[in-house]
Image: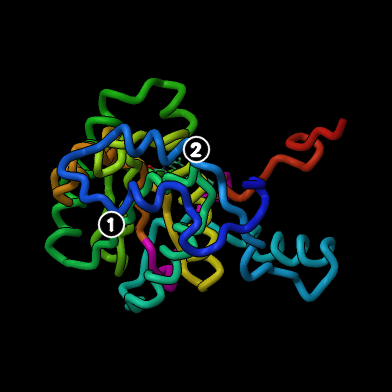
Amino acid sequence: MNAKQPAKQGQHPLEKASCREPKREDSRLRILQAMTDPRFVPPPDVYIPDASAEAAARAFYEVMRRRRTIREYSDRPVSRETIEWIVRAAGSAPSGANKQPWRFVCVQDTDTKRRIRKAAEEEERAFYEQRANDEWLADLEPLGTDPDKSFLEVAPWLIVVFKLIRQEDGGQVYYPAESVGLASGMLLAAAHHAGLVTLTHTPSPMTFLSKVLDRPDNERPFLLIPVGYPADDCLVPQAAITRKSLDEIMIVR
Ligand SMILES: Cc1cc2nc3c(=O)[nH]c(=O)nc-3n(C[C@H](O)[C@H](O)[C@H](O)COP(=O)(O)O)c2cc1C
């Protein structure tokens, strides 16, 4: 079969094999599937901006440049539906061999948030008092961060992003850190686009999140992201606003 020719229903050479009931993990079948001829279809739902590429790119930048990491939250509720759309946006990210090696555990339960705050503050106290070296502490100083993580109880949602190091059935994943990083960036963009604020929090180490949220061995905590509205009187560190210029970050050859 011509690899680029769209496959017709019932034509797939492995369909018979995949109908068979696998009694246990069958890695041979998986390898065989990976070796199958690719099927191709036209890209579904192509997005075409209603402005020129330049105007659309600039408009997106004008939205994104106003995203800010926020550490003071209002307790104003955010609907579950909003969070679901944001997670769908994150889940639309590209990933190595399309393995989608991510899980987004969305926490709104008060007691679970309290347990996460308590464990995060314990780790953060050890970080600020012992683990962080002098250069790291000096770099954090202008941001004014400290071990107090009260926002973890105030924000209506905590989205805990987990990176899969294996699939549930033991199958491999590829470039999980790159993939989950991209998905997380899209999650932040989606929340910002919805008028919400976030914080990319990385209490170090984050292993307590696996325990508190009862996650399986194939998942590793990646980011802890409070999502909500900013507190009325919230402030952001001046040092976080400045950005490198285009000349500093872009090279054209
Ligand atoms: C991977 C990563 C980890 C971060 N970890 C923390 C953190 O643990 N605590 C915190 O307050 N901010 C954390 N931040 C937020 C950064 O300090 C913030 O993005 C930076 O100062 C720029 O500010 P802006 O996001 O408002 O542009 C983290 C950001 C990233 C991307």
* Residue 238 included in the magenta stretch of the image: yes
- Label 1: state its secondary structure: strand
Residue located 66% across and 47% down the image: 2
Report the front residue among 25 and 78.
25
Alpha carbons under labels 2 and 1: distance apart: 19 Å
Q: Give the range drawn in magenta.
A: 227-239
Horizontal and vertical percent position of residue 131: 29, 24
- Label 2: state its secondary structure: helix
Horizontal and vertical percent position of residue 247: 81, 37
Disc on res. 178:
2
Q: Does the residue labelled 2 lie within 8 Å of ligand 1?
A: no
Q: How many numbered marks are there? A: 2
**Label 1 belongs to which residue?**
105
- Label 1 is placed on what type of residue? Val
Q: Is residue 165 visible?
A: no
Q: Is residue 45 visible?
A: yes
